Amino acid sequence: MNGFDHWNSALRASCGHYYAAPDRTARDWAGTFNMRQRSGVDVAEVRCLPARIERTRKGILRDDQEHFFLLRQMEGETGILHAGRETLLRPGEFLLLDSTRAAELSISGGPAAFLSAHLPRALVLERRREIPAAGCKITPAHPLHASLCGLLDADGTDDAAGYIYDLVPLAFAGAGAHPGAGCLGSRKYRFRLVRETLDLLSTDPGLTVDTLAARTGLSRRQLQREFQENGTTFTDCLTRTRLAAVADKLRHAARQGARVQIAQVAYGAGFGDISHFNRSFRQRFGCSPRGFLSTCNHNGLLAQDANSLAPAPKTAPPGRACLFQSNPADG
């Protein structure tokens, strides 16, 4: 942890002329400011005690570089006045700052930590007809929240550098705009958003191609074309996603030496038909789910496989509709 002067110098060097002042009531003020590369862009990891940060007209004129700053609150709370909007940013929420507009950030009540992805303004606006809505925040309920989180995770990779410049304007589209994959300029990024949305919804046993199409802002025909051009189908992609989730949970249970009911894991992943799950699992991994778990379990502990200890139910439990009856339209 560093004192205020060192922290403020790092802020100014990395973000431009933002003027900060510490809360004088906070004793032994300290903070950290570290730069990282995530998804091919510079990301500041900021942690500090209560302080006030301002972006004034004077500071705007003194900077020769323009950025959008994608903020993700990690700890504490930050009050933000920007672009005519007054917002309290809480952990897990995102907000977009435009360096060409005045801003006030107030950290009070306790320490705070947030990430700030530095996006050159020209690259964000490239191929865009509208300027993203600065000052707006995105909560976990937003359909693109999970995708934004993935871009700023510690394992973000350079292959997402172009994706972030497409996704941020889409996420912060103007009021009333629907975030749709069809607005993304790159076909590769469109399908990436489709896949990420499918991952997010895959545990819903009632998920259909129409539901996914509506969530991604594509027509049913457009969505099926996206899958076809990437060598797969909606049904195959959904099944593989759910199987991967089951396999991950079984591996985790094996590492922990925990007993697990495989049927319940399958239902939790979104499968509505255990017989179909067992067939799909064997086709994908070359063994039964119980055999897979036994192989993973280095301690030799056997799982309680509800499917093997009792006859498979002829009907799914309440609320668990069978998902995989043949439906060529979904392929």
Image (cartoon, rainbow, N blue to C red):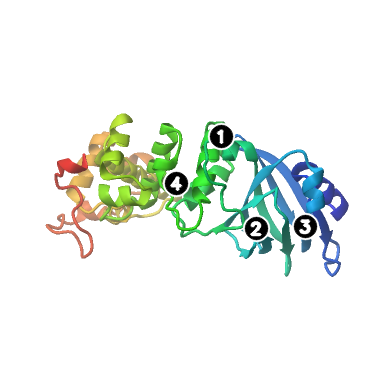
Residue 79 against residue 205 in the figure, above or below: below
Estimate the x, y position of residue 49 in percent, counting from the top left.
77, 61
The image quadrant that residue 259 belongs to is: bottom left
Residue that appears at 61% across and 53% down: 134
Q: Which of 122 and 306 is in front in this view?
A: 122
Q: Contact, CB < 8 Å: mark 4 with mark 2?
A: no
How would you rate the neighbour count of disc 3 (Cα within 10 Å): few for under 14, some for 14-19, many for 20 or more? some
State which mark lies toward you, 1 or 4: 1
State how far apart marks 2 and 1 are (Cα): 26 Å
Residue labelled with disc 4: 255
Report helix, strand or loop for mark 4: helix
- Residue 279 shown left or right of residue 59 in the figure: left
State how far apart marks 4 and 2 are (Cα): 50 Å
Estimate the x, y position of residue 3 in percent, counting from the top left.
86, 54
Report helix, strand or loop for mark 1: helix
Residue 296 against residue 57 in the figure, above or below: above
Q: Could you tell me the amino acid type at mark 1?
A: Ala
Q: Contact, CB < 8 Å: mark 4 with mark 3?
A: no
Q: Contact, CB < 8 Å: mark 2 with mark 1?
A: no
Residue labelled with disc 3: 54
State which mark lies toward you, 3 or 1: 3
State how far apart marks 3 and 1 are (Cα): 29 Å
Can residue 284 be seen in the rendering of this structure? Answer: yes
Residue labelled with disc 2: 83
How would you rate the neighbour count of disc 2 (Cα within 10 Å): few for under 14, some for 14-19, many for 20 or more? some
The image's mark for residue 161 is 1
Residue 127 against residue 91 in the figure, above or below: above
Q: Contact, CB < 8 Å: mark 1 with mark 4?
A: no
Answer with mark 2 or mark 1, whichever residue precedes in sequence.
Answer: 2
Answer with mark 4 or mark 2, whichever residue precedes in sequence.
Answer: 2
State how far apart marks 4 and 3 are (Cα): 49 Å
State which mark lies toward you, 4 or 3: 3
